[in-house]
Image (cartoon, grey):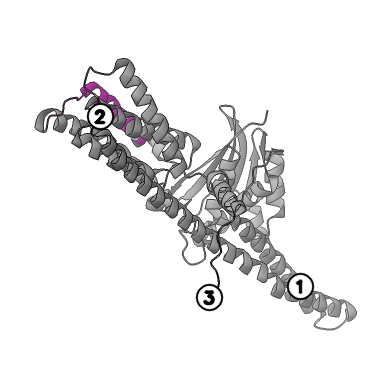
């Protein structure tokens, strides 16, 4: 038998570094507008319901209606359109984390202490720990439990009611029960995070490899185009020379288009490996460059793109990554116009650059088929595609990741059969 390999200290250190520092944070697990709305409703109604249960039906030693109403209002924050419409927005994530921190470890720990750690609130604390690790990143949940519990304990010492503490004889039992709940929640959350990342990483790696492998037949096609072009130039008077020249031109155009698509897919495949960049990028220059370089399938398609520069701005990001973002949005818009049987009139695809409220804004709007309202909460998820025939569902996930890495936000407004408008808001470079 081969001896089992034990992890070396360097391997353990590498694993800890990967899990604690390099793994991307997921402030909201399984994010969607509907999920945020229902979570907010559960806090809004649940606090009022349990205020009645613990005070009227199954009275507990301590209950505070004012505190419950304040907690209900926190739940209502998650239901507002400004917060729930874009789960990937940084403001939404910050509000989500604050609400859950106050609602779960702070409020529940306070109630546990004020009720002298009775059976009801010991069980509730166990449920709180499991819920907290189920809705947010395990690192945020761990930090939240420590800080929230500490804050509740300090508040209890300062302004808490005059009640008996948890009986000394029961403290070891409570410690064991809570430690067990915490360890199980941590293991399950950590293993789920690893599984999600591994599945996504393997799928992205496979796509990247496949995209690279397509370079070989494309190189052959490019050589065939060169050979046809040389043959046409060698015998210009031949009756088929013009036809060969036209065929070579089309073949080269096809190779350029496919290479452009491969570059886009390779960039999408690096969804989990997007480093932060701090180079200064001019929005107007970026848009003009991407629009000029895009491999349109026809001159009519190219002429339908209208660029409007209301006010240029500079932001800090990667020009290469944002070029891929605009490429993805332009590609989707042109596909939408094609699906709508559009004749590509001038201005059917509009890209606008401007500023609003001290933030830069890039808007990509089209008059295509649009997106069904039921699909809007899902479109930024990896591997979700509204076009199951051709889409792989990575383009918009990549766009969102790049925009967020620059400290910005991306939002979409769309109506089916009318069109779609993607708005990128970015902080100005200082």
Q: Quadrant of the C terminus?
A: top right
Q: Nearer the viewer, residue 156 or 300?
A: 156
Instruction: Give residue 340's position: percent from left, percent from top.
Output: 49, 59
Quadrant of res 222? bottom right
Q: Could you say where residue 47 lies in the image, as x and y percent from the top left?
A: 24, 32
**Label 3 to label 2, Cα distance in Å?**
52 Å
The one of 408 and 69 positioned closer to us in this rendering: 69
Q: Which residue is mark 3?
A: 1
Query: Residue 45: x and y, percent?
Result: 23, 35
| Residue position for label 1 | 222
Q: Nearer the viewer, mark 1 or mark 2?
A: 2
Indicate the secondary structure of the residue bearing disc 2: loop
Q: Is residue 298 among what the camera can see?
A: no
Precedes in sequence: disc 3 or disc 2:
3
Q: Earlier in the sequence, mark 1 or mark 2?
A: 2
Q: Reading the chain from its start, which is encountered first: label 3 or label 1?
A: 3
Q: List the residue tagged with mark 2.
A: 168
Which residue is depicted at the point 53% across and 75% down? 1
């Amino acid at each position: 038998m081969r001896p089992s390999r034990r992890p070396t200290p360097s391997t353990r250190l590498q694993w800890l570094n990967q899990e604690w520092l390099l793994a991307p944070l997921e402030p909201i697990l399984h994010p969607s507008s509907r999920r945020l709305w229902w979570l907010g409703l559960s806090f809004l109604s649940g606090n009022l319901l349990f205020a009645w249960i613990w005070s009227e039906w199954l009275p507990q030693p301590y209950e505070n209606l004012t505190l419950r109403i304040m907690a209900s209002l926190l739940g209502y924050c998650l239901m507002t359109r400004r917060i729930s419409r874009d789960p990937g927005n940084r403001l939404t994530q910050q509000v989500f984390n604050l609400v859950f921190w106050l609602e779960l470890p702070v409020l529940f720990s306070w109630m546990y202490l004020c009720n002298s750690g009775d059976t009801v609130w010991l069980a509730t604390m166990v449920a709180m720990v499991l819920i907290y690790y189920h809705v947010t990143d395990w690192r945020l949940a761990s930090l939240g439990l420590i800080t929230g519990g500490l804050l509740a304990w300090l508040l209890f010492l300062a302004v808490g009611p005059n009640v008996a503490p948890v009986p000394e004889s029961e403290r070891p039992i409570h410690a064991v029960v809570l430690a067990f709940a915490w360890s199980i929640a941590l293991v399950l959350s950590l293993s789920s995070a690893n599984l999600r990342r591994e599945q996504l990483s393997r799928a992205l790696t496979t796509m990247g490899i496949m995209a690279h492998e397509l370079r070989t037949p494309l190189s052959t096609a490019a050589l065939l185009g060169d050979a046809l072009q040389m043959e046409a130039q060698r015998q210009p008077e031949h009756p088929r020379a013009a036809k060969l020249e036209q065929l070579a031109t089309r073949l080269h155009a096809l190779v350029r288009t496919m290479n452009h698509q491969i570059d886009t897919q390779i960039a999408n495949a690096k969804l989990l490996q997007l480093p932060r960049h701090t180079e200064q990028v001019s929005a107007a220059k970026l848009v003009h460059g991407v629009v000029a370089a895009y491999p349109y399938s026809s001159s009519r398609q190219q002429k339908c793109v209208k660029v409007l520069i209301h006010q240029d701005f500079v932001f800090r990001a990667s020009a290469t990554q944002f070029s891929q973002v605009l490429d993805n949005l332009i590609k989707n818009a042109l596909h939408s116009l094609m699906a709508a049987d559009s004749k590509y009139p001038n201005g059917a695809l509009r890209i606008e650059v401007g500023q609003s409220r001290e933030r830069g804004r890039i808007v990509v709007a089209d008059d295509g088929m649009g997106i069904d309202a039921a699909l809007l909460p899902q479109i930024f998820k990896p591997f979700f595609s509204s076009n199951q025939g051709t889409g792989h569902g990575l383009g918009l996930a990549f766009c969102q990741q790049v925009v967020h890495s620059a400290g910005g936000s991306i939002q979409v407004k769309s109506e089916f059969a009318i069109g779609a408008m993607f708005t990128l808001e970015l902080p100005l470079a200082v």
